[in-house]
Image (cartoon, grey):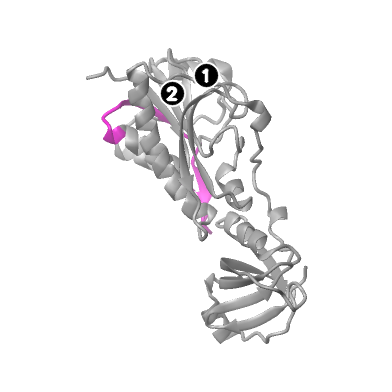
Amino acid sequence: MAAKYRIIFMGTPEFAVPSLQALLDHGEEVVAVVCQPDKPKGRGRKLSPPPVKELALAAGLPVLQPTKVRTPEFLEELRAYRPDLMVVTAYGRILTGPVLNLPRLGTINVHGSLLPKYRGAAPVQWAVLNGDPETGITIMQMDEGMDTGDILLPGSLAIQPDDTSGTLAVKMAALGGRLLIEALELLKAGNLPPQKQDDSLATPAPPLTKELSPIDWQKSAQKISCQIRGLDPWPMAHTTLEGKWLRFFAPQVIPGPVREAPGTLCRADKTGLTVATGEGYLRLGEVQLEGSKRMSADAFLRGRPLASGIRFPT
């Protein structure tokens, strides 16, 4: 049996939980877990631990939550655990060379794209926003660049027509856990050669902003569908209705020639809201009006009927 590595795991959100769980299920020696500090949540703004911390505490693992990662004190704290390897999955902080190079085997990352495509903070979301047919996970050797390190092990995943960033992230997180264990086994066997990235093929995946939310109905139904699904669960795509934002979810593209002006509500019934676009129609199965909860279009229309022919601004 291959010798176990002393591993420090670094991760924070739900996306990172399957990676840590995979290490634990595989019997790896996780000596410590590093995640971001607890943050206030809810109306009471009560401090809540990140998902990775909850799993780590349940497993009886030491948890570090530094407010700063570029200090000698943090470096010494890591060194005290004598790690052979560090594994990073969506930690959310930029790590410097002294931290990355501290373990004798360096630091590997579970990244949410097929590198060199989508380097940056939101690779899952941009794959949906851009209408890609597939994405994947890359296990990579970290360096001080933004996702520029050598590729160790990639794995692809098809993007389904109804996938949102939220549903796709769940699938990718699970794939990340499986791929991480496969990479560790190959590393222990001395069969995980690094491959340089082709920088000429690199594309950015910057953080999402609310400026991406407004819908331009002159775009095609397919592009608007990608926008709605790519911005779900945050920051969500919207139009306006009588001065309030109206968010849309569960889009369905209906191809065909369009007779109405883009943004025209052509049909409103229990099947959804059907809106004309610059190319094709878009049927929207769920909505959320400002100040209300997300609900089916059918439930929304029972409380607020909409007449065909109204036009959403574009």
Q: Are marks 2 and 1 in contact (CB under 8 Å)?
A: yes
Residue shown at 40% from the left, 30% from the top: 33
Q: Position of residue 226 (x, y in %)?
A: 61, 57
Residue 252 in the image: above or below residue 50 = below
Q: Name which quarter of the figure residue 121 lies in.
A: top right
Quadrant of the snapshot with the N terminus: top left
Q: In this rendering, does residue 200 appear at all?
A: yes
Can you tell which of label 2 and label 1 is closer to the viewer? Answer: 2
Q: Exactly how many numbered labels are in the figure?
A: 2
Task: Describe the element under mark 1 as helix, strand or loop.
Answer: helix
Residue shown at 37% from the left, 42% from the top: 54
- Which numbered tag is attached to residue 99? 1
Q: Specify the amino acid type for callout 1.
A: Val
What's the distance in space between the residues labelled 2 and 1, CA to CA? 9 Å
Residue occupying the far front of the picture: 257
Within 10 angstroms of label 1, few (less than 14), some, or many (20 or more) residues? many
Task: Describe the element under mark 2 as helix, strand or loop.
Answer: strand
Q: In this rendering, does residue 19 appear at all?
A: no
**Along the polypeptide, which appears first: circle 2 or circle 1?**
2
Within 10 angstroms of label 2, few (less than 14), some, or many (20 or more) residues? many
Q: Is residue 77 left or right of residue 265?
A: left
Q: Position of residue 183 (x, y in %)?
A: 38, 27
Residue 132 part of the magenta-drawn span: no
Residue 37 part of the magenta-drawn span: yes
Q: Specify the amino acid type for callout 2.
A: Met
- Which numbered tag is attached to residue 86? 2
Find the magenta span and give its range: 24-48
